[in-house]
Image: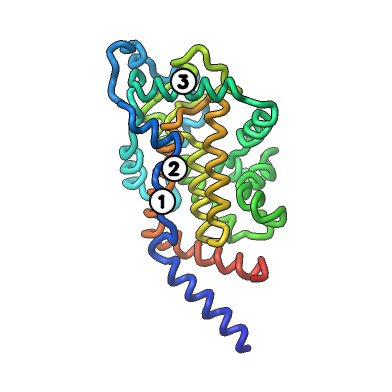
């Protein structure tokens, strides 16, 4: 009985520390993201034609329906504020020219092993709409993708069946993520890198605007969420999110500025979450479930 009360005390102490703010700060911008941000993002008249290019409406996909979906933990006002908090550099800017040169350099250095890995990561993606239809042929696979980061770092037994409380939390987070992603994309209509640079040969083409990166957004918002549940694994979750965002550059489908903006938005989403009573309740239950089920 004493051991039980000691365990309960530790859990409640952890809850009190996790209710109201994140345990982790956003790491400063670094590496090539920092170097590219130091270059002018203003229009360059020598490449003025590039500023006339937007993502072609003929390439819009069904993802536009997320513009009418209601957020789960975020409010409509928070979605609007976050969508207005980021902007991409002018297409004609020196920064974008350097970003395109960087993507061409990555393209020239692709290895078969890299291509296999980034294409595997590119196929990962949880869709809230699929989760609403249990008879959907992709329903089970969709839930596997929901737990991709957890399964990748914590083992195959970390799944929706074994951790229903964590599943509920992640589903709410991912609903907000998709709404956030496509609100920004269809508000700003940034063309993909291959729309501006004909020398780019992307490994795939995407039927939604470039900014901001959806893969990077889900990679980081899930990494931040998992880090609140399993804080001792925070460095590994962030490292996996970093790999995912860089994979989009290797594939030739995202500018580095798409990816850095998504990392920033993901962290801002987390700060809003800690102001939400429902999120804090679901997070507490997810932490308790993890502590119980993982045997810690």
CA gap, disc 2 to disc 1?
Answer: 9 Å
> What residue would you read off at disc 3?
101
Q: Farthest bottom residue?
A: 2
Q: For residue 95, which numbered disc appears in the image?
A: none
Name above or below for residue 166 compared with residue 123: below
CA gap, disc 3 to disc 1?
Answer: 28 Å
Say which quarter of the image contains residue 280: bottom left
Residue at disc 1, secondary structure: loop
Q: Please report whichever mark, 2 or 3, sits nearer to the chain's N-terminal start.
A: 3
> What residue would you read off at disc 1?
26
Residue 196, percent across and down?
44, 16
Residue sitting at x 27%, y 13%: 45
CA gap, disc 2 to disc 3?
Answer: 22 Å
Question: Given contact means CB atoms under 8 Å apart, are the residues at marks 3 and 1 in contact?
Answer: no
On the question of residue 27 being in view, the answer is: yes
Mark toward the viewer: 2 or 1: 1
Mark toward the viewer: 2 or 3: 3
Residue sitting at x 36%, y 50%: 75
Q: How many labels does the image show?
A: 3
Residue 58, percent across and down?
48, 16
Q: For residue 263, which numbered disc appears in the image?
A: 2
Quadrant in the picture for the C terminus: bottom right
Question: Given contact means CB atoms under 8 Å apart, are the residues at marks 2 and 1 in contact?
Answer: yes
Q: In this view, does 103 lie to the left or right of 76?
A: right
Question: Given contact means CB atoms under 8 Å apart, are the residues at marks 2 and 3 in contact?
Answer: no
Residue at disc 3, secondary structure: helix
Residue 8, percent across and down?
55, 79
Q: Please report whichever mark, 3 or 1, sits nearer to the chain's N-terminal start.
A: 1
Q: Please report whichever mark, 2 or 1, sits nearer to the chain's N-terminal start.
A: 1
Residue at disc 2, secondary structure: helix
Camera-side residue of 192 and 134? 192
């Amino acid at each position: 009985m004493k051991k039980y009360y000691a365990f309960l005390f530790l859990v409640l102490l952890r809850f009190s520390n996790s209710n109201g703010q994140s345990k982790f700060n956003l790491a400063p911008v670094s590496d090539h993201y920092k170097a590219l941000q130091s270059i002018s993002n203003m229009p360059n008249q020598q490449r003025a034609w590039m500023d006339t290019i937007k993502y072609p409406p003929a390439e819009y996909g069904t993802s536009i329906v997320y513009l009418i979906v209601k957020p789960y933990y975020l409010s409509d006002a928070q979605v609007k504020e976050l969508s207005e908090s980021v902007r991409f550099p002018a297409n004609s800017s020196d920064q974008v020219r350097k970003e395109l040169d960087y993507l061409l350099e990555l393209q020239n250095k692709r290895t078969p092993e890299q291509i296999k890995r980034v294409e595997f990561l590119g196929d990962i993606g949880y869709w809230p709409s699929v989760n609403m239809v249990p008879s959907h042929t992709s329903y089970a696979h969709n839930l596997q993708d929901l737990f991709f980061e957890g399964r990748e770092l914590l083992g195959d037994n970390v799944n929706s069946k074994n951790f229903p409380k964590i599943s509920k939390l992640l589903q709410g987070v991912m609903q907000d993520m998709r709404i956030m992603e496509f609100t920004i994309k269809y508000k700003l209509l940034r063309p993909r890198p291959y729309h501006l640079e004909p020398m780019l040969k992307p490994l795939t083409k995407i039927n939604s605007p470039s900014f901001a990166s959806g893969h990077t957004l889900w990679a980081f918002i899930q990494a931040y969420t998992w880090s609140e549940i399993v804080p001792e694994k925070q460095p590994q979750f962030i490292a996996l999110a970093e790999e995912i965002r860089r994979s989009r550059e290797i594939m030739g489908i995202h500018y580095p500025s798409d990816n850095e903006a998504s990392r920033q938005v993901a962290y801002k989403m987390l700060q809003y979450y800690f102001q939400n009573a429902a999120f804090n309740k679901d997070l507490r239950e997810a932490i308790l479930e993890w502590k119980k089920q993982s045997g810690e």
